[in-house]
Image (tube, grey):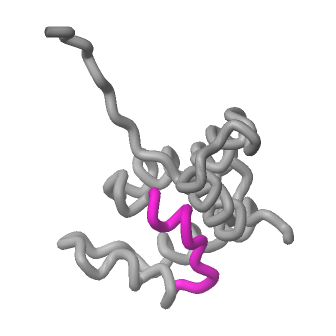
Amino acid sequence: MNNKEVSESKLSLPQVKKAMASIGEENMDQFQRRTFDYVSKFAKADPADAAMLSEKLVTEYGLDEDEAIQIVNCMPESVDELRAFLTAGRKIIEASKLATIVELLNEKRALK
C-alpha cells in the first residue's frame, strides 16, 4: 500500500481560478471547464490580493479561516452585508472593525 502524506488547504475563488488557469483550458475535462467558468465569473479579487486579504482577516481581525475565505469570495460592500457572514460565530466584532474590513475589501476589489 502506498502511504502518501496528503495536505489540504482552503482556497478562495480567485486562487482556484489562478490554479486552474495554469492547467490550461484545453487540458481540462468537462467538469473542470465548468468549474473554471464558474470561478472566472465569480472571482471578485486578484489571486494575490485574495490570499493577502484572507490571511489579514485571520491574523489581524481574529476571524476563522472559513469565514475569511467566504468573505473574500463574496467581497461584501457594506457592514450589513459583512455581518451576514459573521452571524454564526460566537464572537462579537466592533462596528469600527467591521467598517475597516469593508474599507480593506473595497481597496482590493477587482474592477470589472
Indicate left or right for 23 with 90 as reference: right
Image label count: 0
The image position of residue 8, as x and y in percent, is: 34, 34
Q: Which residues are magenta?
A: 69-79
- From what the image shows, is residue 33 above or below residue 91? above
In this rendered view, identify the residue nearer to me: 53 or 19. 19
Give the residue furthest to the bottom.
80
In this rendered view, identify the residue nearer to me: 54 or 1. 1
Quarter placement of the N terminus: top left
The image position of residue 106, as x and y in percent, is: 71, 70
- From what the image shows, is residue 78 above or below residue 59? below
| Residue occupying the point 70% across, 69% down | 41
The image position of residue 28, as x and y in percent, is: 64, 43
- From what the image shows, is residue 22 above or below residue 15? above
Indicate left or right for 94 with 73 as reference: left
The image position of residue 62, as x and y in percent, is: 35, 55
| Residue occupying the point 85% across, 71% down | 112
Write down the quadrant of residue 105 in the picture.
Answer: bottom right
| Type of secondary structure dominating the magenta stretch | helix
Give the residue furthest to the right.
112
| Residue occupying the point 57% across, 50% down | 32
In this rendered view, identify the residue nearer to me: 5 or 108. 5
In this rendered view, identify the residue nearer to me: 81 or 37. 37
Indicate left or right for 47 with 2 as reference: right
Give the residue furthest to the front.
30
Q: Residue 85: within the magenta?
A: no
Indicate left or right for 34 with 8 as reference: right
Q: Residue 74: within the magenta?
A: yes
| Residue occupying the point 58% across, 44% down | 51
